[in-house]
Image (spheres, rainbow, N blue to C red):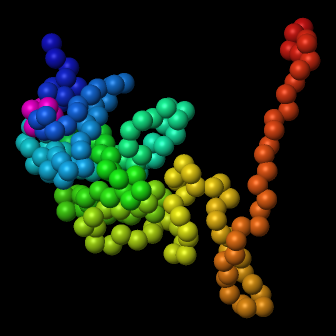
Amino acid sequence: MTTKLEVLELALKKALGEGAAVSTALGEVTVVVKAADYLQAMQTLRDDPQLAFDELVDLCGVDYSQYGEGSWDGLRFAAVSHLLSIEHNWRVRVRVFAPDDDMPVLPTVTGIWRSANWFEREAFDLFGIMFEGHGDLRRILTDYGFIGHPFRKDFPISGYVEMRYDPEQKRVIYQPVTIEPRENIPRVIREENYGIK
């Protein structure tokens, strides 16, 4: 007897062919595609009647630079999408890695699912992932003058600039961060009989 996940996995392998790696873990199916095959794979996932993933539920950016406590050896930036087929009542996760870590660029899927618009803007704003062909790729959560991408693992916790209202100039101004970084060292209890009654 085949389970619903096994049926989905077989349908994905048949529809996407050798260009996609399909795996199942913890009750979820994940498809990893190459950036060059990304648009075609997403179109197939939506249009193939055996799959019918008609809804893009989420799309987010991921920075793998310190994944696995720094043991990650692959590409740094990925876009991860979660798709839903209402007709078949199943879900799939699609992961695509940007081929260039210095300038992460992936094709947009806004032509396939309009709901990707703000999700891709968020991934651009927070991770710096560019989506080629996106009609309105601009910041969505940070300020227009914000420098950098705050969800990257190498972004400093205090940021690069801070803003404040200057009463003399009667406007908001940006200036270098004045917060001194400090390390909080936890207090360690070293009593021999601590916790023993």
Residue occupying image coordinates x 76% and y 55%: 181
Q: Residue furthest bottom?
A: 169
Q: Quadrant of residue 135?
A: bottom left
Q: Could you tell me residue 172's position as x and y percent?
A: 67, 82
Q: Quadrant of residue 109?
A: bottom left
* Image quarter (top left, top right, bottom left or bottom right) of the N terminus: top left
* Bounds of the magenta segment: 11-15
**Front one among 65 and 127:** 65
For residue 52, side relative to residue 158 (left or right)? left
Q: Is residue 81 visible?
A: no
* Image quarter (top left, top right, bottom left or bottom right) of the C terminus: top right
**Front one among 158 and 195:** 158
Residue 12 counted in the magenta span: yes
- Judged by its main secondary structure, the magenta piece is helix
Residue 45's place in the image compared with 181, above or below, is: above
**Front one among 28 and 162:** 162
Total numbered labels: 0
Residue 4 counted in the magenta span: no
Residue occupying image coordinates x 68% and y 59%: 158
Residue occupying image coordinates x 16% and y 39%: 19
Q: Is residue 50 visible?
A: yes
Q: Could you tell me residue 145's position as x and y percent?
A: 55, 75
